[in-house]
Image: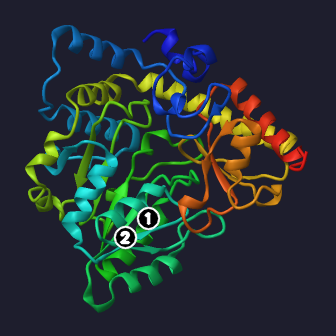
Amino acid sequence: MSSYEHTDPLRRLSLGELRRRTSAKWRTYPPDVLPLWVAEMDVPLPEPVARVLAEAVALGDTGYATGEGYAEALAGFARERWGWYGVATDRTAVVADVMRGVVEVLRLVTGPGDAVVVTPPVYPPFHAFVAHEGRRVVAAPLDRTGRLDPGALRAAFREATAAGRRAALLLCSPHNPTGTVHTRPELTAVAELARRYGVRVVADEVHAPLVLPGAEFVPYLSVPGAEDAFSVLSASKAWNLAGLKAALVVAGPEAAAGLGRLPPEVSHGPSHLGVLAHTAALRHAGGWLDALLGGLDANRRLLGELLARELPEVGYRPPEGGYLAWLDCRAAGLGDDPAAAFLERGRVALTSGPPFGAGGTGHVRLNLAASPDVLGEAVRRMSATVRRDPAA
């Protein structure tokens, strides 16, 4: 492994190089805006991923995805990183991406009119996709410290299963937007409650490889009582591969038969290049990931220092996992949707808090997977937004 692979990927690309990109992060807003919103990282591709893609293109290997290589690569990664031996290839299905996988599993375990419990503030597509599928959204808000609330879950499960209806919990683990990494006791308590009320759990674990020092990722399917649950995982977030579509549904031992009920067309959605890229990342880009985690750890500390100095009005609890910072701006005097003010007056694009549901008002989500220089400039602009007289 080269020394280059051990250097922080967040420090390798200049702002000028990044502005040449044509993805959503860099083309949604005008060039004077610093984009720290959507979950794309300012990093180059890991060399093993770039190599496998270049080889496939050179061969014209751009057909349909097939094989068990992705599942085998995830199984190896899970054993090495998490000590988890629960990814059996015959209990997996390749899907186009995590949210499509979530939707297909929810179709297996619930029907129209049934309830899906979510834990807001949470990734906005959870609300939108569930509602679009004709399911009812039932909220079990996180507690004041941003952690799962057993009392809220119990009440939501009771409501969701009233009159004998089927129900599911759509669990975000690690949690987006707070960066909370659920502990084994917390997840075990979830599984116990889900069993008691007959609620099927679907765990979105797309941020699993991005758990930072001081926390430990616990696969939901590894806790007692989760045998009838499903997990959906992908290499997309950890290696910045969102545009290379692929993900895996993993079924617990008691849920494996459900995978056989997935419609055949589900397997047509994944990109062959995506499967190749994700497989290479899981198998060969562990060193790159370790360097990235070091950079993200440094950035979460840097963001705390910058905010304490420049924007003490903004509340910040450093994320335990991922690269998304959930900022409480209610004391900054910017109204219910501070992201609008930061964009209009500060030229910094952040993700608005209200669409995340309960607890989102007055908050913004900031993507800290950027260079330290960009983070510093973003906070300077945000501070100027707060200090500026709106009437000026």
Q: How many marks?
A: 2
Image quarter (top left, top right, bottom left or bottom right) of the C terminus: top right
Contact check, label 2 and label 1, Cβ < 8 Å: yes
**Residue shown at the point (26%, 84%) measured from the top left:** 165
- Residue at the extreme front: 391
For the residue marked with disc 1, what is the amino acid?
Leu
For the residue marked with disc 2, what is the amino acid?
Ala
Q: Secondary structure at mark 1?
A: helix
- List the residue tagged with mark 1: 187
Colour scheme used in the picture? Answer: rainbow
Image location of residue 47, percent across then percent down: 39, 14
- List the residue tagged with mark 2: 191
Image quarter (top left, top right, bottom left or bottom right) of the N terminus: top left
Q: Residues within 10 Å of mark 2 (few under 14, many from 20)?
A: many
Q: Nearer the viewer, residue 170 or 226?
A: 170
Image location of residue 82, percent across then percent down: 39, 44
Image location of residue 186, percent across then percent down: 49, 66
Q: CA distance from mark 2 to mark 1?
A: 6 Å
